[in-house]
Image (cartoon, helix red, strand yellow):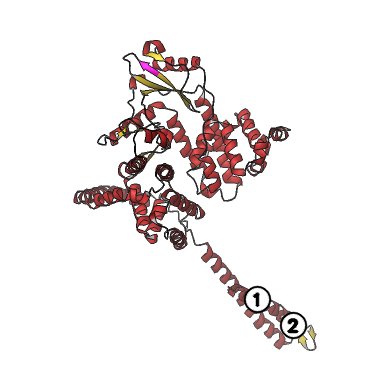
Amino acid sequence: MLNSIRVIERTYLHAQRYRQILAVLFKYGFDDLVERLNLESYVEKGLKLIARGDQSEAIQKATSAERTRMAIEELGPTFIKLGQILSTHPDILSEEIVVEFEKLQDHVPAFSFDEVRKIVEEDLGESIESVYDDFQETPIAAASIGQVHRAKLKDGKEVVVKVQRPGIKRIVETDLDILFHLAELAERHMEGMEAHNPSKVIEDFSQTIHNELDFTTEAANMEAFLGEFRHEEGVYVPTVYHDLTSPRVLTMEFVRGIKPSNIEELRKADFDPNQIAHRGYKYMIQQILVFGFFHADPHPANHLVMSDGTICYLDFGMMGHLSRREREEFADLVTAIAKRDEVLAAKSFVRLSNWDTEPDREKLEKALEHFMNQHFHKSLKKMELGRLLRELVEILGDFRMRLPQDLLLVVKALSTVEGLGRMLNPEFDPIAEAEPMLRRLQRARKHPLRVAQDTMDATGEMLHFLRELPGQMRTFFSAIRRGRLDIKFEPTGLEPLLTMLDKVSSRLSLAILVGSLVIGSSVIVLSGVPPTWHDIPLIGIVGFVVTGFLSLWLIVSIIRQSKP
């Protein structure tokens, strides 16, 4: 709570940035979002009219999803990165917006070479001329986080130098403060948004973008990735020059090659596009299911096919991690899809998911089975694994369930590589490509050494538990003796039962009251207590009338409740 208050306090200090964000929202026609988030207090007089006046014809003709993407691109690097992360969340966003967010690109001008020189020399502690034999002033690529320059070392080796954009860290920190505030407002004011936990989404995103802002983390990712594929001759990772690398500068080997999406160039170089598709998908499945450490942004621009056919991976800023349990559960899910076993697929997907309130398992499994039955009539070749997984994630969203962020990255990565595979070969079959790795994983899980290791691990945990148990029990009973043991019992899921019991007890009380009135009124009538009307005591008459009304109300209430 204290952290949230501090975030809000810092957010108020960023009034100028807030004003820019609101101006962009108005410009692209999102007045309703400003109102729903209760941001009217941030709006200056006339800001809405001025921003609306900036609307071009292209904005007016664009769809809501297109305007959302355009607004995010205008808001800059932090929001672009967030949009790319949100494209993995079909459980939160509509398919139309997810598709638009997948198009998000960094359209930013390059920064000056004077600034490049300043950053490189500050971080490396030497002049550019003393470190590099040649350093090209014009960048070969510019993005929101940094830009890339060709260079040559003193020993003649060709390298590329990635330099972080000046001031980007301060911009990101400001935007993150605002995004945390907006997430809290969304949870508070937008119905149903709390179930999607936007604050957790921003928290995960914050960790991701901070990793990207530290180029030493990317260098470590490259080394770890190379270690995984050390026995695979068909994979290449550029060499990192660690003595010329810092949080804001990354120096690595320059690699020549062809982008795998350039089919014409591949054929000119006598490469078989189908073979490239097969190997690329195989390596992706291997990263996910075997290593549990995978390239989370495997679009074509981040791959090169080298002259000998080796696939070179680039840009290791965004990586995903899966535990052994997650890998095995995911393998079970893909295996169930391959076998067309909708029941096993539903159970695997449920086990992979998280939730705040446990969903109705029966309804969820029926929904998943219905979905599987709709898709499993297709041939495996026509089945798009990535799209199938994304639509399954949407169903989880309907039940207020969610996959961990790294599993969402798996879905996106598989979709991207599968799309490239179908581009290279229209007959590309992702299920058939995945089956050999799935069989290998299943065999490994049943191997005697693996079973023995799992048994030893379980035994070790049990022994540790038994060693700790006496001490825990002593603490427990000591707390009881001192009267310091507080047990808090909060039953959940009993609301319908409690409501029903409340109604039953109310009706029972009313029935007792009605019976008492009948008996009391009868005694008064028989006793002839004055005043009377036609020799009948008036108090007795009133008692019978009240009893009649109460009895009628009780009967009507019971009849209404009994209707289906």
Q: Which residue is mark 1?
A: 556
Q: Residue at x 52, y 20 (%)?
A: 111
Q: Position of residue 167 (x, y in %)?
A: 52, 23
- Which mark is first along the chain, 1 or 2? 2
Q: Which residue is mark 2?
A: 541
Quadrant for the C terminus in the image = bottom right
Q: Is residue 414 left or right of residue 90?
A: left
Q: Position of residue 170 (x, y in %)?
A: 52, 26
Q: Count residues near mark 1 (Cα–Cα under 10 Å), then give few for <14, some for 14-19, many for 20+.
A: few
SS at badge 2? helix
> How many numbered discs, if any?
2
Looking at the picture, tell me which residue is in the foreground, 186 or 409: 409
Q: Is residue 270 left or right of residue 360?
A: left
Residue stretch in magenta: 151-156
Say if the magenta span includes residue 154.
yes
- The kind of residue tagged 2 is Ile
Looking at the picture, tell me which residue is in the foreground, 350 or 378: 378
Q: Residue at x 35, y 48 (%)?
A: 326
Residue 407 location, quadrant: top left
Eyeballing the image, is 280 above or below 362? above
Q: Is residue 199 visible from the viewing direction of this image?
A: yes
Q: Position of residue 151 (x, y in %)?
A: 39, 18
Mark 2 or mark 1: which is in front?
Answer: 1
Q: Is residue 281 left or right of residue 190?
A: left
